[in-house]
Amino acid sequence: MKANRISLTFSSLPQNVTVARMLASTIGAQLDLPINELEEIKVAVSEAVSNSIIHGYDNSPDNSVSLELEVSEDNLTIKVIDTGCGIKDIKQAMQASFSTDPERMGLGFIFMQSFMDDLQVESSLGSGTKVTMVKRINRQHPSSH
Amino acid sequence: MKKRLERQTLHLYVDGELDMKTASQLKNMIDIDIDKKGIRTVVLHMDDLHFIDSSGLGVILGRYKKLLPLGGQIKLTNVPPNLYRIMELSGLPKIIEFSQEETAL
């Protein structure tokens, strides 16, 4: 498998959450990841991009979110980057059922953590947030390609 | 999205993907019927739902919280197994009634 890199920058619009997760899932499918793992990637990307739009930009559509996908021998690395308000307390934000909005479940980071093999969050107040998630590619079974 | 009103019960046939965009549409649709038509039971038929994330789950939980003090309830039926796994992780099945029905529409 050759290394591959894709990056996509899009407006902070709700309909682009679909675009982001479909792209990530398409790349996952090219790596022959099983369907349940593709589902997990879709949820994780959806959570990260939704967080950027809802919390990072307070639902303002005039900003940009970047999605970076990197395929290496063993990993699919997915980065979701915004230049929004940043997270005040990352530890608190990553706890179950912590949400600043009563209509939301506060599960975004829990889903990212549960569905990906590694999750890192870097954030600084006023300048943005970068979420890096890794899905390991299990190559025990030789690929037919 | 197909819907059917039956006395005080709203049946919604949720299809496609439930994320931050479609979840807010679903929320508005349900809330109008609760507020204007006195709906007290909402049944979400999930047969044709392909994707859900925490925005979608949040709207379901939010309707549960809205209906509870009104003496109402929300029920989910025919949730596809791959989506049930995600719902289970959210703890939703502990507070909301899930069912499977054999009959088609």
Image (cartoon, rainbow, N blue to C red):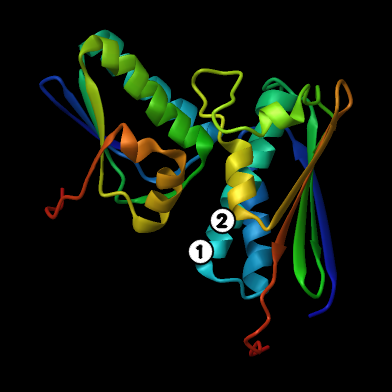
Write the residue at 78% across / 80% down. A1
Against B2, is A23 above or below?
below
Q: Position of residue A124 (x, y in %)?
A: 87, 27
Instruction: Out of A73 and A63, give the one closest to the viewer.
Output: A73
Q: Which quadrant is the N terminus of chain B positioned in?
A: top left
Q: Is B2 placed left or right of A49 in the picture?
A: left
User: Mark 2 sits on what residue?
Assistant: A40
Write the residue at 69% across / 71% down. A137
Q: CA distance from mark 1 to mark 2?
A: 6 Å
Q: Position of residue A107 (x, y in %)?
A: 56, 35
Answer whether labels 1 and 2 touch (C-beta < 8 Å): yes
Against B53, is A133 above or below?
below
- Which image quadrant is residue B2 in? top left
Can see residue A133? yes
The residue type indicated by label 2 comes to: Glu
As helix, strand or loop, the secondary structure at mark 2 comes to: helix
Write the residue at 68% across / 29% down. A93
Residue neighbourhood size for the residue with mark 2, other residues' Cα within 10 Å, grouped as few (<14), some (14–19), many (≥20): many
- Which image quadrant is residue A111 in? top right
Residue neighbourhood size for the residue with mark 1, other residues' Cα within 10 Å, grouped as few (<14), some (14–19), many (≥20): few
Q: Position of residue B58 (x, y in %)?
A: 46, 29
User: Mark 1 sits on what residue?
Assistant: A36
Against A87, is A77 above or below?
below
Q: Position of residue B77 (x, y in %)?
A: 24, 44
